[in-house]
C-alpha cells in the first residue's frame, strides 16, 4: 500500500522528467510547500488536483512537486514544469509570489495561478479564500459554548490573514456573549506540533475552554482531548478524527471548484488574469459538520449565519465597529471594503494585547 | 495583564514535560561526547525514535513497547554512524549531518501511514498519598513514567562517570584514546557502546514527543530539539546535572513565555519567543566559568595503527 503510493509518486516524477507524453492533453502543474500528507494546507490543495483529474479524465494530465522550499528552488521547479509543457501552473504558497512572477515573465504562453499573493501579470492570476467568513461561524459557536468565557487563540504569524481571523471570530463571539475574552498566543510557526500542543495546554491552564487555532497541525486538538471539556475547531482540513469532541466543527479549504474552473478556462481558451477572493458562497470555504456536542439551537444559529454569509445578505465585518484604540472604523450598517481587509493590521475594540510588529 | 492567571504549580509541572525530550537527547549525547565522539545526528536519531515508538505503540497498543522500540530504533540508526566513523573512519561531523538528513527522510517514509492516528495513552503515575500533597504532589509525583526515567538516567550517568571504573575508562578513552589504547582498553568497542547509548536516549526523547507531549505523528515533528540538545551539552560543560538544569531552564522558559503571552504581559512577543535560547545560554555560560573543557579527543578519529 505504502509502496504503491511511493511508486505512483516516483512514476509521476519520472513523467515530469521525461516530458509530455500526449501532446493534446492539457497539462496542469502544482507546486506544494509541504508534503501532500500533512493533513492540512497541502493536503487540501492536492485534493483539488485530484478533483481536476477526476473531472476531465483523459483530457488533462496533472503533475505536482511537494515540499518545495520558498526560494530559488521554487523557481527551478516552476521553470522545469513550464519547460516540460505545462499549460497551467498553480503555485500554492505565499512565499512563491516573486518566483511565480519571475518564471511567468520567461514563459508568456504558460498561465500561472498564485495562491494568497497579490502580484498579478498578464499570465498570472491570484486567488485566495475568505477564511474569515468561516471564523465568524466558529466565533459564534465558541461564544455560545464557552462556560469560562475565556477563548484561547493560537496565532501563527501576525499577518493580515491571521489578524482578520482573530477579529472575525472575536466580533461574532462577543455578539452572542458580551462577557467573552480572547487570549492570544503567537507561535511564530505554521507547523510545529510540540509548540502548538504547549500553546494549547497553556491556554487551557489559564482557563480557556475553547481553543481556536491558525496553525496547521492537529496537536492542539490532541491537547484539548487530553484536558477534557475543551472544544476546538479543525483548521484548513476537517480534522474529523477528533470529532465529535473536542473538534465540534471546522473550516475546510475547498480548492476543487476553482481548480476545475480555471483548468476549463485554459482548455476553452477563455483564461484571463484575475484576482479571486471567494468565501462560503462560492464554496471555497466550507464549514465542517457541526457535531452533536453543540446544542441544537446553537447549531441552527450557526447554520443560519453560514447561510447569510453565503448568500451575501450579511458581511462578517458589518458596523458599528471600532478599532482597539477606540477610534471609529465602520458606521452602523457599513461593511468593510476588501482593501482594508486585505491589509488588516489592527484589532477591533475589546481585544486585549498588542499585535507584534 | 494579570499574572494571577498563571498557576505556578501547573507551570512547573508542564515545564518538566516540555524539558524531558531535550534532557533525554542531551544526556545521551553527553555520554557519546565523553567517549570522544561528536555525533551531530541527534535530530535524526530522535525523529527515527519518534516514528518507531509511535508505530510500535499503535500496532501493539502498548506505549511501553513503543518506548522500547524507540530506544532500539535510535540505537540501530546510530550503528550507521558507528559504521561510518569507527570502521570506515569517516569524518564525524559530516557523518553526523548525514545521519540527521537520513533520519528525517527515513522517518517521513515509514511514517506515511501513521498520519492522523491517535496513539494509546501511557497515563500518569499517581503515587498514592504523596501525590496528594498540595503543591509538591502535582509538581513531583503526578507525571508519566518516562519523565522520571529521564531524571533517573541523568543521575545514573552522573554516578557512573564519577564513581565507577566503567566511567573512568569511558572518560580516559575520551580524553586520550592513544593512552587508553596503550593501557589495553578497547577504544572502538567502548565508543560503539557509548554511541548506541546516545542513540537509544535520543530515540526515547523523540518518542516522548510523539507519544506523550503532542501526542501524534507528523513529519519533522522534533523541530530542532536535537540541535538544541547538542548545544546544551557544550554549554553544560559536559556535566550531567548542568544538562538537567539547562533542559529545565529551556523547557521552563519556553512554557513560561507562552504563559506570559496568554496572560497579556506587555513585553513584545518577539523578545518572549527568543528568551528561552538567550537565557539558557547566558546562565550556562556563567556557570561554565570554571574552565571545564571538552574531552581532549572529541571529534578525533582513532585507529590502532596511529
Image: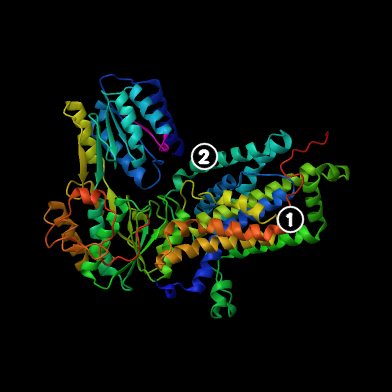
- In space, the residues marked 1 and 2 are separated at their CA atoms by 39 Å
Label 2: chain letter: B
Q: Is residue B98 magenta?
A: no
**Residue indicated by mark 1:** B291
Q: Is residue B298 above or below residue A261?
A: below
Q: Residue at x 33, y 37 (%)?
A: A97
Report x, y in % for residue A17. Answer: 41, 23
Residue A61: which disc?
A: none
Please tell me whether the stretch drawn in magenta is mainly helix, strand or loop. Answer: loop
| Nearest to viewer (mark 1 / mark 2) | 1
Indicate left or right for A132 with B271 as reference. left
- Give the magenta part as a residue range: A62-71
Q: Is residue A65 magenta?
A: yes
Q: Residue at x 21, y 44 (%)?
A: A277
**Residue indicated by mark 2:** B105
Residue toward you, B189 or B11? B11
Amino acid at each position: 500500500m505504502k509502496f504503491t503510493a511511493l511508486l505512483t509518486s516516483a512514476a509521476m516524477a519520472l513523467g515530469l522528467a521525461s516530458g509530455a507524453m500526449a501532446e493534446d492533453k492539457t497539462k496542469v502543474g502544482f507546486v506544494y510547500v509541504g508534503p501532500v500528507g500533512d493533513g492540512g494546507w497541502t493536503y487540501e490543495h492536492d485534493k483539488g488536483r485530484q478533483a481536476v483529474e477526476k473531472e476531465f479524465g483523459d483530457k488533462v494530465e496533472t503533475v505536482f512537486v511537494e515540499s518545495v522550499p520558498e526560494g530559488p528552488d521554487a523557481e527551478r521547479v516552476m521553470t522545469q514544469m513550464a519547460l516540460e509543457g505545462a499549460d497551467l501552473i498553480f503555485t500554492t504558497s505565499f512565499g512563491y509570489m516573486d518566483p511565480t512572477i519571475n518564471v511567468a515573465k520567461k514563459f508568456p504562453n504558460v498561465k500561472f495561478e498564485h495562491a494568497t499573493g497579490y502580484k498579478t501579470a498578464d499570465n498570472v492570476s491570484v486567488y485566495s479564500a475568505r477564511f474569515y467568513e468561516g471564523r465568524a461561524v466558529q466565533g459564534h459557536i465558541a461564544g455560545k459554548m464557552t462556560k469560562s468565557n475565556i477563548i484561547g487563540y493560537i496565532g501563527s504569524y501576525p499577518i493580515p490573514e491571521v489578524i482578520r481571523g482573530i477579529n472575525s471570530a472575536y466580533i461574532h463571539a462577543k455578539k452572542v456573549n458580551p462577557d467573552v475574552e480572547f487570549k492570544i498566543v503567537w507561535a511564530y510557526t505554521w507547523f510545529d506540533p510540540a509548540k502548538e500542543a504547549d500553546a494549547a495546554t497553556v491556554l487551557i491552564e489559564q482557563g480557556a475552554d475553547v481553543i481556536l487555532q491558525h496553525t496547521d497541525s492537529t496537536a492542539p486538538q490532541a491537547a484539548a482531548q487530553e484536558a477534557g471539556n475543551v472544544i476546538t475547531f479543525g483548521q484548513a482540513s476537517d480534522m474529523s478524527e477528533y470529532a465529535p469532541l473536542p473538534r465540534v466543527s471546522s473550516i475546510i479549504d475547498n480548492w476543487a471548484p476553482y481548480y476545475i474552473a480555471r483548468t476549463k478556462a485554459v482548455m476553452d481558451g477563455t483564461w484571463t488574469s484575475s484576482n479571486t477572493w471567494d468565501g462560503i458562497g462560492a464554496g471555497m470555504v466550507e464549514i465542517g459538520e457541526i457535531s452533536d456536542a453543540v446544542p441544537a439551537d446553537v447549531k441552527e444559529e450557526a447554520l443560519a449565519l453560514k447561510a447569510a454569509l453565503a448568500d451575501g445578505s450579511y458581511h462578517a465585518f458589518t458596523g458599528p465597529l471600532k478599532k482597539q484604540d477606540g477610534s471609529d472604523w465602520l458606521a452602523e450598517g457599513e461593511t468593510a471594503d476588501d482593501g482594508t481587509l486585505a491589509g488588516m493590521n489592527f484589532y477591533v475594540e475589546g481585544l486585549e494585547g498588542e499585535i507584534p510588529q | 495583564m494579570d499574572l494571577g492567571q498563571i498557576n505556578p504549580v501547573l507551570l512547573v509541572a508542564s515545564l518538566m514535560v516540555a524539558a524531558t525530550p531535550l534532557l533525554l537527547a542531551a544526556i545521551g549525547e553527553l555520554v557519546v561526547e565523553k567517549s570522544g565522539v561528536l555525533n551531530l545526528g541527534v535530530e535524526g536519531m530522535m525523529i527515527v525514535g519518534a516514528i518507531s515508538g509511535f508505530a510500535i505503540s499503535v500496532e501493539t497498543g502498548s506505549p511501553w513497547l513503543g518506548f522500547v522500540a524507540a530506544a532500539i530504533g535510535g540505537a540501530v540508526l546510530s550503528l550507521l554512524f558507528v559504521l561510518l566513523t569507527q570502521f570506515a573512519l569517516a569524518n564525524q561531523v559530516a557523518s553526523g549531518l548525514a545521519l540527521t538528513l537520513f533520519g528525517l527522510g527515513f522517518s517521513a517514509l515509514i511514517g506515511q501511514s501513521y498520519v492522523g492516528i491517535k496513539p494509546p495513552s501511557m497515563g500518569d503515575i499517581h503515587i498514592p498519598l504523596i501525590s496528594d500533597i498540595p503543591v509538591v504532589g502535582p509538581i513531583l509525583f503526578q507525571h508519566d513514567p518516562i519523565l522520571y526515567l529521564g531524571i533517573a538516567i541523568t543521575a545514573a550517568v552522573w554516578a557512573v562517570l564519577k564513581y565507577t571504573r566503567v566511567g573512568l575508562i569511558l572518560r580516559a578513552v575520551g580524553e586520550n584514546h592513544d593512552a587508553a589504547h596503550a593501557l589495553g582498553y578497547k577504544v572502538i568497542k567502548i565508543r560503539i557502546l557509548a554511541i548506541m547509548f546516545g542513540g537509544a536516549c535520543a530515540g526515547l526523547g523523540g518518542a516522548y514527543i510523539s507519544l506523550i507531549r503532542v501526542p501524534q505523528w507528523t513529519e519533522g515533528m522534533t523541530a530542532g530539539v536535537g540541535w538544541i540538545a547538542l548545544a546544551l551539552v557544550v554549554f553544560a560543560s559536559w556535566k550531567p546535572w548542568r544538562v538537567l538544569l539547562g533542559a529545565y531552564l529551556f523547557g521552563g522558559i519556553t512554557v513560561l513565555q507562552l504563559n506570559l503571552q496568554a496572560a497579556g504581559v506587555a513585553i513584545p512577543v518577539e523578545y518572549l519567543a527568543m528568551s528561552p535560547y538567550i537565557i539558557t545560554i547566558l546562565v550556562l555560560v556563567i556557570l561554565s566559568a570554571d574552565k571545564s573543557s571538552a574531552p581532549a579527543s572529541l571529534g578525533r578519529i582513532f585507529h590502532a595503527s596511529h
